[in-house]
Amino acid sequence: MKKSEYQPRVAYSSWLVKRAERAVGAALYDVLRDLGITPSQYGVLQALVRLERASSAELARAVFVTPQAMTGLIAGLERQRYIKRKPLKSSRVIEATLTPLGRRVFDEATERVGRIDAQLVSNLSGDEVLALHSALERCVDAFESDGESRPEAPDDLVEEQTARA
């Protein structure tokens, strides 16, 4: 990606974070496309690996999308047989679990995502990577730890994913 000639006079930090997010997002879409998943669907698979089983609401919280958006993500993964869902006996909640095929796709996707993450920080030293992680965590904390409720950002990518699913 060539360096942008445009630089805002205000909100430069926010602009840089958004620019990085767009570059990483495009790279993730490229490396995951032939596996039939989007970056958000990879996040669902990753959450299921960690949680083993989860409801749609739990998965939505884990990957930062609305429950409505999660419906499309899950439908696509279920259609490809990467996950399976079944209702819990004691409630109306339907839990999702990873299938063996989903686990193989997740493992391959994880290798690819790891390469993208390595590329993202390839111009940084180990200490700079640690400093970046620390700085970004503190930036997120500035919004999450004050107790104020903020509106969710629109998930324009989920609309694309649902249309493709």
Image (cartoon, rainbow, N blue to C red):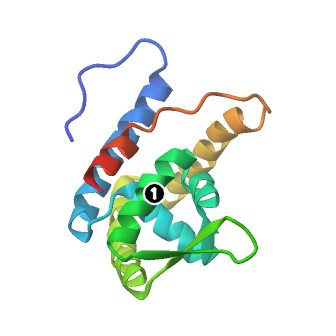
Question: Residue 90 versus residue 111: which sits nearer the camera?
Answer: 90
Q: Count of labels shown?
A: 1
Query: Which residue: 40% across, 42% down?
Result: 21
Residue receiving disc 1: 125
**In the image: residue 112, left or right of residue 127:** left
Give the answer, above or below, for where 113 lies relative to 149: below
Residues 96 and 106: in front is 96
Question: Along the line of sight, which residue is nearer the eye, 59 or 46?
Answer: 59
Q: Nearer the viewer, residue 111 or 29?
A: 29
In the rendered view of the protein, which quadrant contains the C terminus? Answer: bottom left
Provide the secondary structure element on which disc 1 rests: loop
Q: Is residue 160 in view from this perspective?
A: yes
**Amino acid at dot 1:** Ser
**Left or right placement of residue 158 versus residue 142 in this view:** left
Does 83 sit above or below residue 160? below
Which quarter of the rendered picture does the N terminus lie within? top left
Q: Is residue 133 above or below residue 87?
A: above
Residue 89 placement (x, y as % from top left): 71, 78
Q: Is residue 119 left or right of residue 64?
A: left
Q: Percent from the top left, x then y, of residue 156?
A: 38, 37
Say which quarter of the image contains residue 59: bottom right
Q: Horizontal and vertical percent for residue 71?
A: 48, 54
Q: Residue 18: horizontal and vertical position, in percent?
A: 41, 34
Residue placed furthest toward the right: 147
Q: Residue at x 78, y 32 (%)?
A: 146
Is residue 114 something one can see in this rendering?
Answer: no
Query: Is 4 situated above or below 122?
Result: above
Q: Residue at x 24, y 33 (%)?
A: 3
Which residue ends up furthest to the bottom in the rendered image? 100
